Amino acid sequence: MHNKVVYHAMKTINAPEWSFEWPVLRFNFRGTGLSEGSYDGRAEAEDVSAALDWLKSEYHRPIVAVGFSFGAAMTLAACCARCGTGEIHAIAALGLPIQSDHRSYDYPYLRDCTLPKFFLSGDRDGFAPSETLLAITEAASQPRRTIFVKDADHFFTGRLEAMQRELAIWLKELES
């Protein structure tokens, strides 16, 4: 929740200087910080679903779900499961992981997920080699866009403004 990528993505969506000023909900997954429960590695998509339900009931507005890293993986799983319901307007996956020290990720449901999808990663992301991530995102159904931030690692170190700019460009296109 307090990760610099999550924070800067939130500022892009919420802060007046980016012209969106949309409501944002950041939360910890189960077993993180003061959250109850324990980490499972897959059931956290239920945490995203609970957050989506809360946003829907509180704001009654189209939802653009944005997740970073593990949060991106869980956000995609939760949102694609709701594809066709009209509840989710679009999904942005920042730093989507393909591999980590303890786990490999796969995304077969992206083939059938017709929600607008934005994949934004660094071209030097150690958890998602560009070629592998591109193969996964190109197998996803349309509409989709994949952008690699030049000279950026998984955490967009030194490239957070570029990450924000690319996210803002995509969000502006959603509005039009």
Image: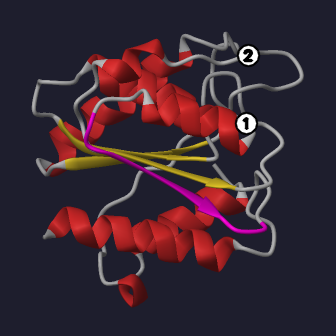
> Residue 22: percent from the left, percent from the top?
29, 66
Determine the image quadrant of residue 109.
top left
> Mark 2 or 1, which is nearer the eye?
2
Can the viewer see residue 28? Answer: no
Q: Position of residue 112 (x, y in %)?
A: 28, 18
| Residue under numbered circle 1 | 33
Residue count near mark 1 (Cα–Cα under 10 Å), binned few <14, some 14–19, many ≥20 = few
Q: Percent from the top left, x then y, of residue 54?
A: 28, 36
Q: Residue at x 76, y 51 (%)?
A: 154
x, y (%) of residue 90? 27, 45
Label 2, on which residue?
A: 104
Dominant secondary structure of the magenta stretch? Answer: strand
First to last magenta residue range: 142-151
Mark 2 residue crowding within 10 angstroms, few (<14) / some (14–19) / many (20+)? few
Q: Quadrant of the C terminus?
A: bottom left
The CA span between labels 2 and 1 is 24 Å
Of the pair 125 and 2, the residue shown nearer to us: 125
Picture residue at 82% right of the left edge, 26% below the top: 100
In magenta stretch: residue 146: yes
